Image (cartoon, rainbow, N blue to C red):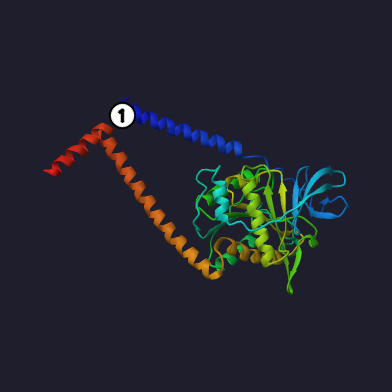
Amino acid sequence: MNDSRIILTLAVLCLLAGTAAVDVLAQSVIDDFDEWLSIGEYYQMVNEAGEIVMETGRVLGQGDEYLTSANELYRVVRVDTANRLAHAELVDVVDIGVVPWTELLKSAGKTLAGMVDSEPRGLIGIYHTHNAESYIPTDGTDSIYGQGGIHRVGAAFAHSLQERGVNVEHSDNLHLPHDRGAYRRSRETALELLAQNPDAIFDVHRDAAPRDAYALQVEDEWVTSVQFVVGRQNQNLGVNREFAQSMKALADQIYPGLVKGIFYGRGNYNQDLSPLALLLEAGAHTNSREAAERGISLFADVVDLYFYGPAEESSKARTEAGSKAATRGIGGLLVFVFACIAVFYVINAGGLGAALDRLRSLFRIRQR
């Protein structure tokens, strides 16, 4: 096979690989069943005794699961749509613990090529799939078309992390309107954030629920608790579940009750893109935005501690991460430049064989 055929074959293989990647991406986008009731209407998940396990404006379905603040795992077995009741059975009382994020990445790496990186990078990504979400007591309405109150909550989260020395990329990209297609639109934003190689990405929302569902008093201050949402239709489910449980376990140690629970619902919420992706619900539309800002600022302590350790270790880890990232970046740039020069040289010489002949001739001349 001559040089031109080799080059043509490589080009075709690259094209086929790109097409396959697009096909895989398209197949991974699953409708997220992110259905909501009208504002003021709620679903209740109740246990066998008729006690309320959780309340939400989200439409619940059979198979949905909920891990309570006491680590009781319930699974919905029957739904009464007329009365908006989801009957759930106790599956287990889960003994959760803190699994280091580096171990989670190694576990994910068994099935996800290119996801393993055991070095801290000191960067957290934040975005909002549902931009319009707002808080009635503060914003005057539950929804503002554009950047709603949830963006202010995301900014408070970002600011709190930055105060702790964490680098943050907070995206204000809009994915309107608030419908099932929002997650397909926000997927592009998630990919943009992941291209920067963050340690984790958080999609910040608010729930729709009665005020008391999220109201929490920490010392003498009212804040809102935070709820995690994990998609069940997602190849990262096992690792996402461990990540959510690890974050909750650590939060339980620092601020008991701050994480009110973990909802495992239908859909993938773009969590198929990364094992360290999590959807946060910071309070509900019935809570004040300031309370949500205070609650998620406390959660920033949990994120900082989980990824970077105590304050003295955290600063060192981020400094080393920045140095290593810079070294990797320069090394990658040099490799790219040399690769481009090599390709240009081969083309200019008239093929790979001719290029090698030139190099041999040059080497013989220098030896003389």
Across and down, in percent, residue 126 comes to: 59, 56
Quarter holding the N terminus is: top left
SS category of the residue bearing label 1: helix
Question: Would you identify the image quadrant in which residue 63 lies?
Answer: top right
Residue bearing the label numbered 1: 3
Across and down, in percent, residue 340 comes to: 33, 43
* Residue beneath the point at 30% across and 26% down: 2
Q: Residue furthest left?
A: 368
Q: Residue furthest bottom?
A: 220
Q: How many marks?
A: 1
Locate residue 364 relative to residue 348 in the image: left or right: left
Considering depth in this image, is 273 or 81 the residue closer to the camera? 273
Locate residue 333 relative to residue 288 in the image: left or right: left
* Residue beneath the point at 67% across and 67% down: 254
Position of residue 165 relative to residue 197, above or below, is below
Across and down, in percent, residue 131 comes to: 65, 53
